[in-house]
Amino acid sequence: MAKRFQIQQMPGFRTIAVVTFVLLYMPIFLLVIYSFNAGTSIAIWEGFSWRWYVSAWDNQQVQEATIRSLVIAFWASAISTTLAVLAALATTRTRKFKGQAAVFAMINQPLMVPEIVTAVALLIFFAMIKVATGYTGLMYLVIAHTAFCIPFAYLPIRARLIGMDLALEQAAADLYAPPFRVFTRITLPQLWPGILAGAMLAFVISLDDVVITEFVKSAGQDTLPTYMLGQLRRVVTPEVNAISTVLLGISVTMVVAFTALSKLKT
Amino acid sequence: MTDSAPPASYATVAEKRASRVRWMLLAPALAVLLFAASGPLLITLVYSMLTPADYGGVIWEPTGDAWFNVFMQRDIFDDTLSWSSAHLSIFWRSVKLSLMTTVGCIIFGFPTAYFIATRPKQQRDMWMLLIIIPFWTNILIRTFAVVELIRNEGTINTLLMWTGLIDEPIQILFTEFSILVGMIYVYLPLMVLPLYASMERLDFSLVEAGYDLYATRMKVLRRIILPLVKPGVIAGSILVFVPSLGAYVTPRVMGGGNQLMIGNLIELQFGQGRNWPLGAALSITLLAIVMVALMAYVRTAGKEGPGHG
């Protein structure tokens, strides 16, 4: 007998899979490589240099957009994670309650409604408020980001809560610990990896958002992604590659950390 | 809700208290969502029934014009009614490209998910991480990475001209084809994730039984594997189709303003078009199509039984 018959093998599947992985990563690799190009081209290699990172760093618009992106992502992830913890405590480990379907529909709405629709809806609503109050600050972006980050923070926290052992909390309650004390001393320490995972997910989602930010932002409120979207209309230099590479680095770090966190045993 | 009830048993009092605590815990999240997600959606619905103001915004006079203009148009000279060919062609392009994206993602995603699911157990997480990383990477960056590859001064054209195969760059960018390539690239992970989830649970003793009964590889794939992983295929198709239909960034960057999809048509009404009610009506139309697709999915998923997808 020649080769052993492999029941799991399908002809051509391995080839397509390898091609898929190559196609998936080749554009990203090229993007990263050309961020180090000494020339102004994004296709002709002229030697290694940090010049585009330096030029991005010195670009005042990029600086401001970066700070704005980080501020929004920080507040949106902090607030949405806090709200998601409370919501997860209310909706997990309980029996079915009245209005449960409506609550889940509301929490998951940002996942189901197309982003462009939410963006337009927020544009309309916030335009009304802007006219009525005259306020045009960053709060609109923070609130919009907080809303669409809630489901992303909620899911890992809820998953962690479901996997947690109720016995410890019951034991604490049996020993006359008041509910709040049970929460801070028993529930919270166990829930921590889920909270961290949810916060990181929310942070990345907020940092990466293009569509909703593009519609909600007032003049001069570019975040890094909307700044890049504006730049793509012009002649593109490797500076955009440099900014992309940094953002890419942040996302990859967060994802790897997130994966490690969600594997932690309860 | 907590009006003074007749003396209740200890259990119902506890239950009432639990319910009050639950709603107190939920209140902040629901308030934010109401303010910045559900509420604005209702206002959009109202806006779709108002009259557009000259410089954006609305005049509070109810009219059905915006909804009429979603698919129809009135001739400005002789008032005759006709289908709005511009809007219809954009809707058709969106649906067509989204279906093609879904099929493209299945062609690349199915073998890939199968490949990962048949790796040794300790390797699978590593392969899946390679799928998840692009999934969590900025959609704009990934679209831009593909643009760099296919634009006239991009890697592919430069390489082809350098080898002398072509004298002039091939125009790939700013075509329907480039939008399709971009969307398949961007949404592929959404197909692989649910496909892998259902393939990982695949019972290969059934496959072995098929071979023992002299089935060919094609027959095993069609008659045994496909029916078993069908929930994953359906879930993946929905996950790809829905965002494709509402895509905004990829057609904007890849289509260069000529090849509009619904998302770009909506944006146009809030920019140059200055017709907010029409933009609102188009948004609600898009939302309705998406909801129908999602509901159809829930139906089929329910029929397939729990534990899958």
Image (cartoon, rainbow, N blue to C red):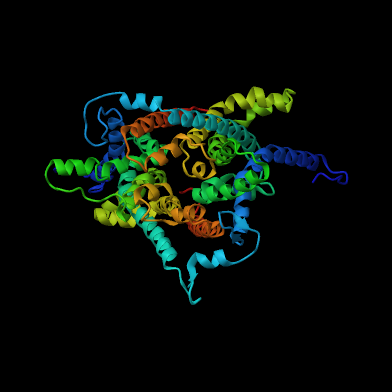
Farthest-out residue, left: B164
Toward the viewer: B74 or B185?
B74
Q: Report x, y in % for residue A26.
A: 27, 38
> Is residue B77 placed above or below B174 in the rendered structure?
below
Residue at image point 21% right, 50% down: B170
Toward the viewer: A11 or B156?
B156
Residue at image point 44% right, 53% down: B264
> Is residue B114 placed above or below B88 in the rendered structure?
above
> Is residue B53 placed above or below A207 in the rendered structure?
below
Quadrant into which the N terminus of chain A falls:
top left
Q: In the shown orientation, is residue B221 left or right of residue B3? A: left
Q: Residue A237 occupies which quadrant of the picture?
A: top left
The answer to whether residue B205 shows anywhere in this view is: no
Q: Report x, y in % for residue B141.
A: 38, 38
Toward the viewer: A29 or A181?
A29
Q: Report x, y in % for residue B78.
A: 49, 77
Residue at image point 81% right, 44% down: B2
Q: In the shown orientation, is residue A163 left or right of residue A13? A: right
Q: Report x, y in % for residue B151.
A: 27, 45
The answer to whether residue B98 shows anywhere in this view is: yes
